[in-house]
């Protein structure tokens, strides 16, 4: 289960080229950047840096809201890889024109896009940047080159993580015991604190944070119902259980054994003859997902992998009862809708990355080597056999799904049970 070539190249580039560049920029900072006045600094325009992982952007919702409260919606900006801007548009928390994208189609395109982004940011005159990436050098370099006077980011004070120089004005310790959404909230709060006292500061993040909400239009609901009817005319208003078998290429270790989705689907269809099972996934996952759907051998299986846009997928969540997926973006996308989610965790811990929605349940075997990826090891692992995911049995997932499904039937609060 090696990392895909594209991700591996990015990580090696960040390590072997990023480290010396961070050292050079740190030297330049010490020579040319003045210490500035003591005490907290007032900021007027805030930029968030979070290139990848749209699920983490959902977890940053409260942090972004706090920034909006501080400087106004029109003064909050976000820089993100082009392929990941979708979720920001759906969240509708900042103006669309305030989202700055960087293409990733090639190393040259990435470098040129980053340069253009920096030039645009400097033209806007951003004075506060929050680097939400977990100890990556590329984000640290971009944050520094924005020219912002206040720069919040994680710093490795004792060599306890990847070296990325000393480019932040507001240096924070990465806290592996604090949920990611709370850590992001603390980073925004740090902007209002005296950088001289950091990383120590007296702030308790919210335990119950407000969630982002997705509300489809009636025409979007009609569109997804039409798609479902086209795929299976018998579906009507039947309850839907969604299965998302494939995690993204970012971390293949997250995948639950594919054939277990087949067994799970068969058992659910037998248990609930009124329901349909829908396989979802990205276009690149369509072929293997369709093969799994065929393996189920039922006319109550719907194949939607590669047939929906990401926005249509969120609309589908509002039409469905339960989603079963491994730790990936859909866990967090679904948290913006009423659907119940059963999320399977292994290489990473739900203590830090679980969806904040009360409708989400995390299953985690908790074996001795799990979690194995974190901010300190640059999300890399020596694991070649994800026993942590294999330790989650079909019985475990079936039991949780049936508990939720039966509860929805009793309360008639499910999306379709009230029909």
Image: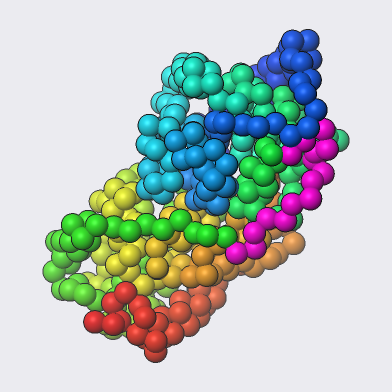
180 to the left or right of 36: left
Give me the residue at 38% from left, 32% from top: 97
The image quarter containing residue 330 is: bottom left
Q: Position of residue 180 (x, y in %)?
A: 63, 51
Name the quadrant of the C terminus: bottom left
Q: Say if 128 sits above or below 393 in the image.
A: above
337 to the left or right of 199: left
Q: Position of residue 319 (x, y in %)?
A: 29, 67
Q: Is residue 228 visible?
A: yes
Q: Does the magenta run of residues contain 238?
A: no
Give me the residue at 44% from left, 70% from top: 340
164 to the left or right of 419: right
Q: How many marks?
A: 0
Give me the residue at 36% from left, 81% from top: 413
Give me the residue at 74% from left, 62% from top: 368
Give the magenta-colored segment's residue range.
193-208
Q: Does the magenta run of residues contain 206?
A: yes
Q: Position of residue 165 (x, y in %)?
A: 75, 24
What is the chief secondary structure element of the magenta stretch? loop
Q: Position of residue 288 (x, y in %)?
A: 36, 53
Q: In the depicted view, which residue is nearer to us: 135 or 293? A: 135
Q: In the depicted view, which residue is nearer to us: 102 or 294? A: 102
191 to the left or right of 299: right
The image quarter containing residue 196 is: top right
Q: Is residue 378 visible?
A: no
């Amino acid at each position: 289960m090696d990392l895909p070539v594209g991700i591996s190249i990015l990580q090696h580039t960040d390590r072997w080229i990023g480290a010396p560049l961070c050292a050079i920029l740190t030297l330049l900072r010490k020579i040319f950047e003045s210490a500035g006045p003591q005490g907290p600094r007032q900021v007027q325009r805030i930029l968030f840096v979070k290139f990848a992982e749209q699920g983490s952007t959902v977890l940053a919702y409260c942090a972004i809201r706090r920034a909006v409260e501080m400087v106004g919606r029109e003064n909050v900006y976000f820089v993100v890889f082009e392929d990941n801007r979708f979720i920001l548009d759906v969240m509708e928390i900042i103006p669309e024109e305030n989202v700055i994208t960087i293409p990733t189609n090639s190393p040259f395109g990435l470098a040129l896009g980053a340069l253009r982004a920096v030039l645009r940011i400097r033209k806007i005159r951003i004075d506060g940047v929050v680097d939400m990436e977990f100890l990556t050098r590329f984000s640290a370099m971009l944050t520094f080159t924005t020219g912002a006077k206040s720069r919040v980011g994680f710093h490795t004070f004792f060599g306890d993580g990847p070296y990325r120089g000393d480019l932040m004005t507001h240096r924070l310790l990465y806290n592996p015991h604090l949920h990611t959404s709370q850590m992001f909230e603390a980073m925004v709060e740090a902007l209002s604190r005296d950088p001289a006292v950091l990383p120590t500061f007296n702030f308790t993040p919210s335990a119950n944070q407000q969630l982002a909400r997705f509300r489809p239009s009636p025409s979007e609901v009609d569109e997804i119902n039409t798609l479902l009817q086209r795929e299976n005319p018998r579906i009507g208003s039947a309850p839907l259980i969604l299965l998302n078998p494939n995690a993204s290429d970012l971390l293949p270790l997250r995948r639950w054994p594919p054939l277990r989705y087949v067994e799970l689907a068969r058992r659910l269809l037998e248990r609930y003859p009124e329901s349909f099972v829908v396989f979802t996934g990205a276009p690149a996952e369509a072929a293997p997902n369709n093969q799994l759907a065929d393996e189920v051998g039922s006319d109550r299986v719907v194949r939607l992998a590669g047939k929906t846009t990401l926005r249509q997928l969120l609309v589908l969540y509002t039409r469905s009862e339960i989603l079963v997926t491994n730790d990936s973006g859909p866990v967090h996308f679904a948290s913006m809708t009423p659907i119940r989610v059963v999320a399977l965790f292994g290489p990473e811990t739900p203590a830090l990355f679980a969806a904040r929605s009360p409708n989400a349940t995390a299953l985690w075997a908790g074996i001795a080597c799990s979690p194995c990826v974190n901010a300190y090891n640059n999300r890399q692992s020596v694991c070649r056999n994800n026993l942590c995911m294999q330790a989650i049995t079909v019985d475990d997932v079936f039991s949780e799904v049936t508990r939720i499904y039966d509860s929805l039937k009793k309360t008639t609060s499910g999306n379709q049970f009230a029909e």
